[in-house]
Amino acid sequence: MPVNTPPAIADIRRAAERLRGLAVETPLLESQALNERLGGRILFKSEVLQRTGSFKFRGAYNKIAGLDPKDRARGVVAYSSGNHAQGVAAAAAMFGIRAVIAMPADAPRAKADNVRRMGGEIVAYDRHREDRTAVVCRYVEDGMVLVPPYDDAAIIAGQGTVGLELSAQARELGAVLDAVIVPCGGGGLTGGVALAVKDASPQTAIWAAEPEHFDDTRRSLEEGSPVANRPGHNSVCDALLTPQPGAITFAINRTALTGAVAVSEPEVFAAMREAMSALKLVVEPGGAVALAAILAGRIDVAGKCVAVVLSGGNVDPDLYARALAAD
Amino acid sequence: MPVNTPPAIADIRRAAERLRGLAVETPLLESQALNERLGGRILFKSEVLQRTGSFKFRGAYNKIAGLDPKDRARGVVAYSSGNHAQGVAAAAAMFGIRAVIAMPADAPRAKADNVRRMGGEIVAYDRHREDRTAVVCRYVEDGMVLVPPYDDAAIIAGQGTVGLELSAQARELGAVLDAVIVPCGGGGLTGGVALAVKDASPQTAIWAAEPEHFDDTRRSLEEGSPVANRPGHNSVCDALLTPQPGAITFAINRTALTGAVAVSEPEVFAAMREAMSALKLVVEPGGAVALAAILAGRIDVAGKCVAVVLSGGNVDPDLYARALAAD
């Protein structure tokens, strides 16, 4: 498939074939307590239980599996705050190739530790002063293949397998999905899920959820073209701090999405607590924004059947304890 | 089946039929990081993801489903620190019958809240001064049916469905189980799992894990007859504080178990942290003792394939944060 156009549904199905037996078919869980409180049926696609603790393994593996073997043998390079890094390191280890990852020096410790454990080589850089593109550039010049975090058809196709699975799992439960809500950074997961879910059930609404100050997809949808986040803000949602939507991801999302909503840090922490007590799942801040969106009433789920993606669970214990205590 | 003898494998299979579509077929998860660290393959039967947050729904539902409908209509009564209480309340709600639960006044708040939410009526009693049997007695005299926590063939058969499932799930993964390790209070889960797993693979060793000072099954196995715990101790593992093995459960466990091991509170907290970071699962203290047993080296798993049951995840956020911070 051309790399600068969205993947087709066939590409997502092929990614699912490649991932069979390697990626976890993560469960679609529900909580009677949450259903009663929200007055709808909420199904949680639990990617915190995925290999490497987030959905990112899916896209990274699909990308690396699709490379020409000669290119692949030279190794891969990526930049990431942590979840994509772990996905790339895990997939590279399966192919027995080298993986170099540029990570911001302030990335969560757990994420960096896991990348190292899987044999990934970390190149730390200063998120505020250094250009990560320049950091990876010299490795690409040496012949290593860049595995982009989201704006790539093979990556989007891999993340789209989340949507294939949740559609099939909902059908098995006899559930007809009114909406699917997806945590959104660069838009790769959102776009891939949108393509897969819309193929299975065109009437299902797809929503993106973002952290406040990093609601570039929401603002871009309003503007009709990609808009960057305003500088000078930070967020506890380290997994979602991308500067602006990708060209390919936005091309998908501008037509596929019903809308996007932003949630605050207290709302994210409340969602992490709810996932702990009602679902027994450890969800990282960025992984909890879609749940936060419905708990905060940003998207109305009363009387509806809605799938919520919990996209990752790689949170340091100190921050997790802080979220639990924030009540 | 007679109530004072162990269930047969056919009773466990019948329980599985009754629970189909009602109980969650909880996933058998694994962590590459833990596998590498321990040098074996560890498969986690994740009952924290079960309806009501612990395995207890299985036995309670199976018991209530097997009652004569006329008896059942009069409602059920149970005593429990919380997990059995929630299981009974959820199952009773499904049958539309009354459930009265005697709970110690110091039971975890989350457990009591959930029982109430599901329509259960709580009768609080003082664990140190009042006899819980006397508390439930007047309800039984009024014609309500007692749903015992563990020493009952229908309860054991229900809990045994955990063993049926994990055996089938391990087989699907191509894994041959050398051992299964089960958190043990009164022995209902341990006994049920032992019967089911031994039927599927007689060579698999079954181990019970208990909190220190509440290692009545370990000491009973040594003595060859049921021995009570010595008074004067407490434990953070509220789910496992039974006074001594049951008559039926011990009849099963004395022949089916390879052994039992006890773990300390710091070891339990370490296991809860490990489940959080490596598995993204919230596990309560009593639910983490089997994982604690292998992390502490009480049972050697090097070079082996071992299933570990994570039996429950109903822990109050304060205690959970304490466990995460205990490092």
Image (cartoon, coloured by chain):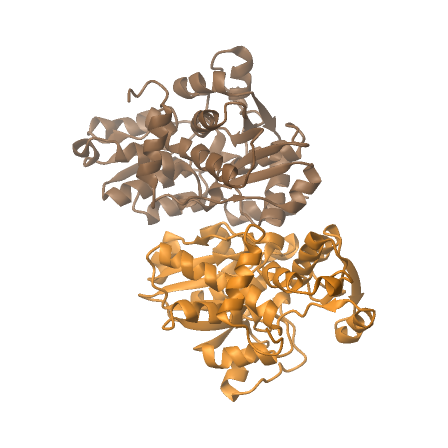
Chain colours: A brown, B orange
A140, B230: nearer the viewer: B230
Q: Residue A262 versus residue B100: which sits nearer the camera? A: B100
Query: Residue A194: image x %, image y %?
Result: 47, 26
Q: For the image shown, how many numbered marks are present on the structure?
A: 0
Residue A237 appears at what percent x and percent y? Answer: 52, 34
Q: Is residue A248 visible?
A: yes
Relative image position of residue A238 (x, y in whole percent) = 49, 35
Query: Can residue B128 be seen in this snapshot?
Result: no
Q: Is residue A191 left or right of residue A94?
A: right
Which residue lies at the image location 52% right of the left edge and 52% below the top edge? Answer: B281
User: Looking at the rendering, which quadrant does residue B139 occupy?
Assistant: bottom right
User: Does residue A248 appear to the left or right of B22 in the view shown?
Assistant: left
Residue in view at x 60 percent, y 46 percent: A322
From the top left corner, tell me how far across and down residue A9 is, in percent.
Answer: 38, 26
Outermost residue toward the left? Answer: A70
The C terminus of chain A appears in which quarter of the rendering? top right
> Quadrant of the image for the N terminus of chain A?
top left
Left or right of B267 in this view: B242: right
Q: Is residue A228 above or below residue B257?
A: above
- Comparing B59 with B266, the one in front is B59
Looking at the image, the residue that sits furthest to the top is A224
B89 up-or-down from A272: above or below: below
